Image (cartoon, rainbow, N blue to C red):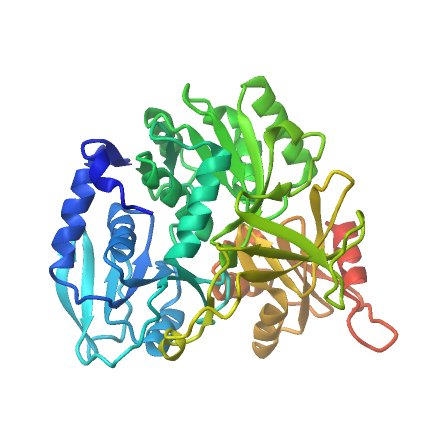
Amino acid sequence: MFEKFRLFKKKIALITDSKKKYTYENLLTEIDRLNQKIKKRSLILIICNNSVSSILSYIFAIIYNHVGIMVDSKTSNKSMLKIIKNFQPNYIFFSKKYPKGLNKSYKKILIFHGSYILKKKDDIKIELNKDLTILLSTSGSMGSSKFVKLSKMNLAQNTKSIIKYLKINNKDKSITSLPLNYSYMLSVINTHLTVGGTIAVTDLSILQKKFWVFFSKSKCTSFNGVPYNYEILSKIGFKNLINGSLKILTQAGGKLEKKINLKIIDFCRKNKLRFYAMYGQTEASPRISYLNPKYSKMKIGSIGKAIPGCKIFLEDESKNKINKPFIEGELICKGKNVFMGYSESYKDLYKESQTKDILRTGDLSYFDNENFYFLTSRKNRVVKIFGNRIDIEQLENLLNKQKFDVYCVELKNKIIILSEKFYEREKLIRYASNETNLNIIAFDYLEINKFPKTQNGKIDYSKLKKIANDRL
């Protein structure tokens, strides 16, 4: 992916909101310095934020053939320690958050661009599959240390496809508008740096005026967001995007509300911008499909068609391929971008790919007469909130263990917690927020008279969702 860095030399690769600039030559110099301190083919836990040091750590892992475990610096200490216990990384890179309780097993060996690097005192032998390169969390896994295993082939194939359909070149610039450990953000970095483009690096939020000042001064040519980003922009004004250089907007990480989708389409039409609604999963490295901008309004709500080099199709419950339009089935993705399998500890990192390039997405969908795909629902109760994958059944169980007798549904990109009893709203939502690592604005709470049930006595979630929709 990053094999052409030496050809780009003096071209700017990274710019920061503190006005620092790093050429491609600088990047190679810095990671070469790091390479002298790190053992070959190591397992590295990268506790990352949107910083130069985290991006350099990621590039270092890719170029020097290490295996990087990307974890958000906002992850709770309890979850972090669980990951460390399960994976026993040879090194830990962190810039903001030091995992408490590691003094006996790790020692500091280096400070690198404001990041600290810890080395395990007593390494255990970890066998790493020759193709494995990055481990990414199944977003919002609430303390679970289940990771998606991606190979260099997976990342390279998806990067090549995205560059092709978005027409990204060495004059393009984007900004860190999403967390670095999120596969969507990594794909933005992969594509731009592969062609010699530029990444504007900031940890600022899109709610801060300074973010938009930096976005404008950086002359970014693209903005990438999940539904939450666009909901915010809908409120604060899409005019913040106008910087004289912007060419495209991209959206993934869940379904946009139709009203906001129409606003974006209208904004792009007036300002001669291209808007790409996209669909993907971390397991697909991550892009699976995109909607060509010329169909944005005509096929509104569609996830479009498969990206180059990838195939998508539907299967019924008996796993027979569906060939007729408007019949719902599970969306299946086939391609070299499909992950190697899941990992829960260092003990399974030696395994060969177990997927045979096939991903059963768990998403139900149909296609129309022109082969445009539309998502309908999930086979299980995993939903996407602000681009994070949340198992709401698991959340229910966690809340129940804390003596909260509640059930949850997803509605309008929020998790609605419902109860027959009175609970202190702030306490309940704060606990749910801490467990999922989602902002409190991702939740709402409702008291209802009685939980609706099906004939066999189970909770009727469709009726529960209707109650929530009627009340909110």
Residue 134 is at least partly visible in this image: yes
Residue closer to the observer: 469 or 369: 369
- Asked where in the image residue 302 lies, by quadrant, the reply is top right
Residue 429 is at least partly visible in this image: no
Residue closer to the observer: 331 or 77: 331
Q: What residue appears at the point 52 percent right and 40 percent down from the top-left corner?
A: 229
Where is 332 relative to 401, above or below?
A: above
Image coordinates of residue 357 in percent, x first then y, are: 53, 61
Image coordinates of residue 467 in percent, x first then y, are: 79, 57
Q: What residue appears at the point 11 percent right and 59 percent down from the top-left corner?
A: 36
Where is 349 relative to 58, above or below?
A: below
Image coordinates of residue 375 in percent, x first then y, are: 69, 50
Image coordinates of residue 20 in percent, x first then y, are: 20, 35
Q: Residue furthest right?
A: 455
Q: What residue appears at the point 55 percent right and 49 percent down from the top-left corner?
A: 310
Instruction: Tell me: 69 left or right of 268.
Output: left
Q: How many numbered marks are there?
A: 0
Residue closer to the observer: 99 or 60: 60
- Asked where in the image residue 219 lies, by quadrant, the reply is top left
Q: What residue appears at the point 29 percent right and 55 percent down from the top-left corner?
A: 62
Residue closer to the observer: 23 or 137: 23
Instruction: Tell me: 124 left or right of 291.
Output: left
